Image (cartoon, grey):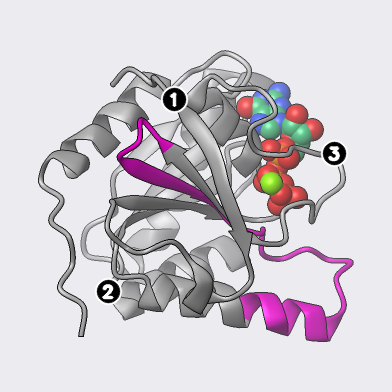
Amino acid sequence: MVIKSATFICSNTQVSKLPPPVMPEYAFIGRSNVGKSSLINMLTSKKGLAKTSQTPGKTQLINHFLINENWYIVDLPGYGYARASKSKKADWDKFIHTYLDKRESLQCVMVLIDSRLEPQKIDVEFCNWLGEKGLSFVLIFTKADKQSNVKTDQNVAKFKKSLGETFEEVPEYFITSSETQLGRDDILTFIENINKVFKIPQLN
Ligand code: GTP
Ligand code: MG
């Protein structure tokens, strides 16, 4: 897919105020600092579209970006930010979960995993939660440029094994780098194929 346009539309904390669910939507989520905003900028080839930061916890809202006038990328706040207060963490959990659970036009949750790390409990638990809710998701391993391919492959295999404990079938996955654009074409093709069959949800 060629990206012709990518525009910031709105930031929200309330699911009731999101744009109407009439276009296919893909939510990018993962631990704080995993590289969500960088990946969004890499996919859209627009530096600075989503705000990146070396300080974890930068993205604190549901941010909608309209791509090619016909689908949305959503940048979500990272989970597991160690320095956030307990009540703030609970707030985030609540609104992320409400969004993921209720958003009719959400086509796929893109779960970002740091490819440098062994499986993290919080990531595995989040995937299990998505599974329980019956939400479709894929895994996106980030920052692959930071170590050897062998190391990346080992961590990917370990993560798949961890998920294999609860899932019969491990979801599709992509290995990416926002620095080298690794994985860009594959992710955009994946999204394009879903967009082709998207139908506007019937709302009650
Ligand atoms: P929050 O919004 O705080 O949850 O973070 P985020 O997941 O959006 O992470 P962000 O994209 O802001 O990136 C965090 C840090 O990792 C920044 O310093 C990025 O430059 C760096 N980073 C992200 N992706 C990559 C990558 O693929 N390769 C390398 N080398 N660095 C990356
Ligand atoms: Mg971010």
Residues rendered magenta in the picture: 67-93
The picture places residue 186, in percent across and down from the top left corner, at: 32, 25
How far is disc 3 from disc 1 in space, using C-alphas?
27 Å
Which amino acid type is shown beneath numbered disc 1? Ser
- The amino acid sitting under disc 3 is Gln
Tally of numbered discs: 3
In terms of secondary structure, where does tag 3 sit?
loop
Pointer 1: residues within 10 angstroms few (<14), some, or many (20+)?
Answer: some
Dot 3 corresponds to which residue?
A: 54
Q: Is residue 6 left or right of residue 116?
A: left
Marks 2 and 3, the one that precedes in the sequence: 3
Q: Nearer the viewer, residue 189 or 69?
A: 69
Query: What amino acid is found at the position of numbered circle 2 in the picture?
Result: Gly
For the C terminus, which image quadrant?
bottom left
* Element class at badge 1: loop
**Which residue is tagged 2?**
134
Whether 108 is among the magenta residues is: no
Whether residues under marks 2 and 1 lie with C-beta atoms below 8 angstroms apart, the answer is no
Residue identifier under label 1: 5
Name the spot of residue 171 as percent of width and height, x first.
Answer: 29, 52
**N-term mark: 2 or 1:** 1
Within the magenta stretch, is there residue 81? yes
